[in-house]
Image: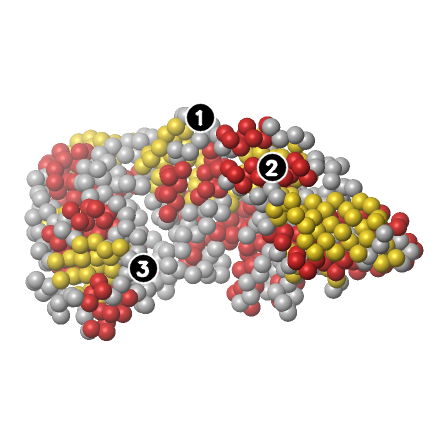
Amino acid sequence: MRLPEGSEIHMVGVCGVGMAGVACLLAGRGYRVSGCDRSLNALADSLRCSGVTVLEGHHTSHVADLPDNSALIVTTAVRSDEPELVAALARGLPVYSRGEALAWLLSESFGIAVCGTHGKTTTACFTARLFQELGADPGWCIGGFTKELGGVAAPGNNRLLIVEADESDGSLQFYHPSVTVVNNIDLDHLEHFDGEESLVACFRRVIDQSGQGVCVCRDDARAWQAVVSSEVQYLDFGLSASSTLRAAAVEVRAESAAFDLLYQGRNYGRIELGCGGQHNVLNALGAASAAIMCGHAMEAVAAALSAACSQLPGRRFEQIHAVNGVRFIADYAHHPVELKAAVEMALAIQPGRVIAVFQPHRYTRTLALGTHFPAAFRGVDEVMLLPVYAASETVVEGGDICDLYGHFREQLPELRVLLARNLKECWFYLRHTLRSGDLVLIAGAGDIIDLRGYFDQAPECALPAAAVSGLQQIERITVTAHAALSSCSTLPTAGRCCSLVEVEDPAGLQAVLALCCANSVPWRMVGAGMNSWFSDCGFEGIVIRIKSGCLGRHALKGDLVEAECGLNGARLLDWLEAQGLSGLEFLEGVPGTLGGWLAMNAGAHGSEIADCVSRVDFIDFAGQLGCASVEDCGFAYRACELLQQAVAVGCTLKLTHRGSEAVRARRRMARDARIPLQRLRTAGSVFRNPSPESAGRLLDQAGCKGMRVGGAYVTDFHANIIAVNQGATGSDVAALIQKMRNRVWFESKVDLKTEICGVL
C-alpha cells in the first residue's frame, strides 16, 4: 500500500490501542485523519490532541464527504457490514488493515520491528526508552506504554520508528524493517494459522525482509532456528553461555532484577532493572541488542540500559489497587507461558495468599491451549475463572470456559477453582473473602481490567443501610447475615448471601418483598431447594425462604382443597391419600414444596399441576397481595407466567374423590415409573424439553451420559440428570451443565433451557 501525500484517512475502530497509534503517526506526518468507534474511551481525547477528528458510532456519513483520493483503515474487529466499510467499497476507495498501514509507515522510516509471541510490548517500550536515553528522538507505535513514554505512539523525528509488530492476523509478513527483534515464537493465534509451520513461516518472512539485520533470543528454539536458517545478519542474545549478548549472574527479586551484561565475552557491568521476572531480563537484552545492531557503542548501551528499563507498560504486572493489606496486580497475560511468568512474579513477593482471577481470551485459543493453562497456575491458592472474552469470535466446541474449568479439575483436583459468571459476581466473592496479606492477580487481555471499577465499593458483604434497618423492624422473620447458602439447595455451593431471611407468615413475606423493591435489593425465593443452584461465589442480595413448619396449613373445603405454599409436597400427597382425593399422584417422588410445584408447573407422565389448580393466592414483587384464577396464571410447560412476577402463598386445588386405596395404587404406579434417584444427590431433570423434542433424547444422542466435571456427573441411566459426589462444588455443576448444553448445540443446533433455577 501507499498513501499519497495530502490524502485524507478515515479509521474505523480508531479507539483501539493499535489503531490509535497508527492515527497518531499519520497525523504527525501531515495527513488529515478522522476516525470513529462504537464507544469512545480515554484514547479519544489523546487523539483529538494529536489533531485527529474522533466520531462516536458508525455511519455512512463519516465517509460520504471524503475526497476521491482518500482511504479507509480498519481494525480486524470490524465486521464486513459496518456502514463506513460498505460505503467506502461502494465508492471504490482503497481499504487497508491496521497491520498494512503500520507496515507502510515503518517502511518510510528507519524502522525497528519488535515481534514475538510474548514480551513484544515490554521490549518495544524498553527499546523506545533506550533510544531516548541514547540521545535519539524515536517515533513509536506500541500496544501499551510506560509513564515515561507517555503514550502508545509519537511521531518523533519521523526518521526512526520503533513498532510492536503483531503476528496475530498474519500482518507481520507485510513489514520490511531495517532491524527486527524476535523475542520468541510460541504456538498461538491458531484461529489464523493452521499450525506451527504456517506460524513460523510468517516470522521467517519478516526475518528475510529485514534490511540491516535481526536480533534474536538464542534461548528460544523456534526463533533461533528461524533466524539461523535465513541468510540475514543477526545478533543473538539470551541467558545461555553461548549467547553473544548475555545476562550472567542473574538475580531475580520480588519486584526487581539484576544481572551482569556481557557482550562477546566482555563484562560491561551490573544492570539493575526496576521490574522483576527473568522474562524481563530477556526483554531488556532484546532492547539492548537493537541498539547495538543500529550502531550504538556497547559502553553507551550498558550505561543507559538500567534507566531505560525502569518501568513496565500498563497491565504488565501493574499494581492497580491496594486496600486493607490486599494488593491487586493486573497483568495482560493470556497465554500459558505468560501466565506462568506472572504467577512466578506474584509468588516471589511471598504474600499471604495468591488468588488468581483469569479471563481467557478467544475461544480458539482456549481450545488450542486449554490443557496447558492449569499448570501455569501451580502455587496459587485459588483460581477464579471468568467467561471467555470472545474478541468477535463465536463459541467453538471445546473452547468454552466450562471446558477450561474441566481441565483444571482434572489436572489440579486439589486446587480451589471457582467459576464466576461476571465481574460483579467475582467482586462479591473477593470482597468478603480477602484478608490482609493477600495478593490478587488479575490476568487476561479482555475487559477483566474493568474489575477495578468495583474497588471503591464497600469491602464487606453488606446491604444498603435502609434495608438492614428495615429488616430489623419486620416481625415474625429470622435474619441471618452473610449466611451460607449450602442449606438452600440440594446441590452443593460454597457461596454466601448478604442475608438469609426466613418468613413465618404472608405478612412477613409481604414486608420483605416490599423492602427489597423499595431499596432495589436483589432477592431470590427458595423452597425446599430441590430445584435451585447457587454460585460458589455467592449471591449479592437476600435469599428468602419459608421457615420450617410455617405456611403449611391445608384443609378440605367442600370439594376443594385449600393449602398454603410452604407445605411439603410429599406431606400433601400423604394427606390427599388419607382423604381419598385423586389428581396429583403423578407428582409422587417429585421433591419440593407446593409453592415450588406451582412456580415450575411441575409435571410428569403427561400431567401437570396446573390441571388441578383452581386459584392461586400470591404476593407480587412490590409486596401486594392478590389472587388469580387458573386461567389468569399463564401456566405453560414447566412455567407459570404469574409466578415469574410474584410469589405464591396459597392455592385452591380441585381434585376427584376416588378413595384411599385407589389413590395409593396410583401413587405406587407413578413411583414405579419414576427414574430411580434414591440415594443420589440430584436436582432431577436439568433441562426442559424443547417441544416437540425430548431433552433426554437430545442429550443421549450427543453422548452426554457419563460426562463428568469434578464431582458432578451425568447418570448412566438418564442423560438429563446430574448427580454429585461428596466434594463436588457448585462450579462443577455449572460447568457440567454448560458442557451438556454446548454438546447438544453443536450436535443438533438446539439451545436447551434449564429447569434448575439460577444456573444459566
Residue in the foreground of this view, choosing between 638 and 737: 638
Going by the numbered disc 1, the residue's amino acid type is Ser
Which element carries disc 3, helix, strand or loop?
Answer: loop
Q: Which residue is mark 1?
A: 436
Residue 386: % across, % down: 46, 47
SS at badge 2 = helix
| Mark sitting earlier along the chain (1/2) | 1
Q: Are marks 3 and 1 in contact (CB under 8 Å)?
A: no
Vertical placement of 353 versus 108: above or below?
Answer: above
Query: Residue 512, which numbered label?
Result: 2
Marks 3, 1: nearer the viewer: 3
Give amino acid for label 2.
Val
Expressed as whole percent of the image width and height from the top left, the position of residue 466 reads 51, 31
First of labels 3, 1 by sequence position:
3
Q: Secondary structure at mark 1?
A: loop
Residue 522 at least partly seen: yes
Residues packed near mark 1 inside 10 Å, few (<14), some (14 to 19) or many (20 plus): few
For the point 68% across and 50% down, which residue is it?
627
Specify whether residue 725 is in view: no
**507 relative to 583, above or below:** above
Picture disc at residue 77:
3
- Horizontally, residue 697 falls left or right of residue 97, namely right
